Amino acid sequence: MEDRSLLERRGGDDLFAHAARIGEEFLQGFEAVDRIDRPAVSLFGSARVREGHPAYEEAREVGKRFAEAGFAVVTGGGPGVMEAANRGAKEGGGLSVGFNIELPHEQHENPYLDIELTFHHFYARKTMFVKAAEGFVIFPGGFGTLDELFESLTLIQTGKVLHFPVVLFDRDYWQELLGWLRERPLAEGLVSPEDIELLHVTDSAEEAVRRVVDEYARRSPRTPAEPQKADAQ
């Protein structure tokens, strides 16, 4: 677990070696992103749901629709929602990408990947989700999913990446979080109305795909179905 050893370290001769390994991991990630020959969307959600769960089946359908629209589907490469979205992408005849992470409980890669890379460092991995993407679709999930959600919002809010759609899938799951954001941070002036407006909420696979595809078409002179590498964000 290189993240843990790096964060616990208080000095020593291995710091330069750690930095070199981190740099190498970023290079490997950039090379993997370069292999994505079309616009892409990053999908996030719980690793704990299984086939038959509503979130699994919805992510599978969304992944399939994105593939049919000419988009690559990028996930964390593991089980649950990640597997479902990659599976749908394959069923839709599209390109399926997984950026996995080495964890203590050995999160194995799912079997539906065309491009796969396993990371040791979360920060290198999360960079690739943003670099590859024309938008995010976020399904119900736990701390990891929330981390990816709020990091994406922060990057957009602070102008570190171009504005791109962030779609929350499952209105019932997300409505209390959105209510809290409006009632506390927004009401107390800690965020701006336009920050809240970065989020789009839906229960519709068609709408989730349309949000991302339409915004990409607005910003790009080429159509989504034409193979190309997604612009670096």
Image: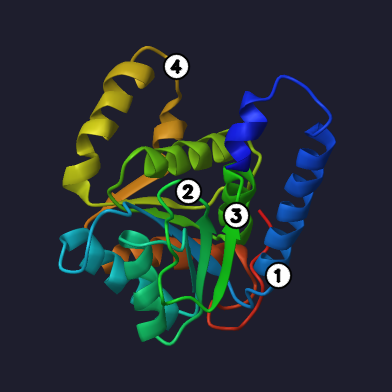
Most extreme residue toward the top, as rendered?
A: 188
Looking at the image, which is closer to me, 227 or 58? 58
Residue 130 appears at what percent x and percent y? 58, 52
Q: Residues within 10 Å of mark 3 (few under 14, many from 20)?
A: many
From the image, state whether disc 1 or disc 2 is nearer to you: 2
From the image, state whether disc 3 or disc 4 is nearer to you: 3
User: In terms of sequence position, does the residue under pointer 3 or pointer 4 come before the other?
Assistant: 3
**According to the image, label 4 marks what residue?**
190
Distance between mark 1 and mark 4 Cα atoms: 38 Å
Q: Residues within 10 Å of mark 1 (few under 14, many from 20)?
A: some
Relative placement, left or right, of 101 versus 231 is: left
Q: Quadrant of the N terminus?
A: top right
User: In terms of sequence position, does the residue under pointer 1 or pointer 2 come before the other?
Assistant: 1
User: In terms of sequence position, does the residue under pointer 3 or pointer 2 come before the other?
Assistant: 2
Which residue sits at x=34%, y=76%?
Answer: 88
Helix, strand or loop at label 1? It is: helix
Kind of residue at badge 1 = Asp
Which residue sits at x=22%, y=68%?
Answer: 57
Residue 34 appears in the rendering: yes
From the image, state whether disc 1 or disc 3 is nearer to you: 3
Distance between mark 2 and mark 4 Cα atoms: 34 Å
Distance between mark 3 and mark 2 Cα atoms: 10 Å
Looking at the image, which is closer to me, 24 or 195? 24
**According to the image, label 1 marks what residue?**
34
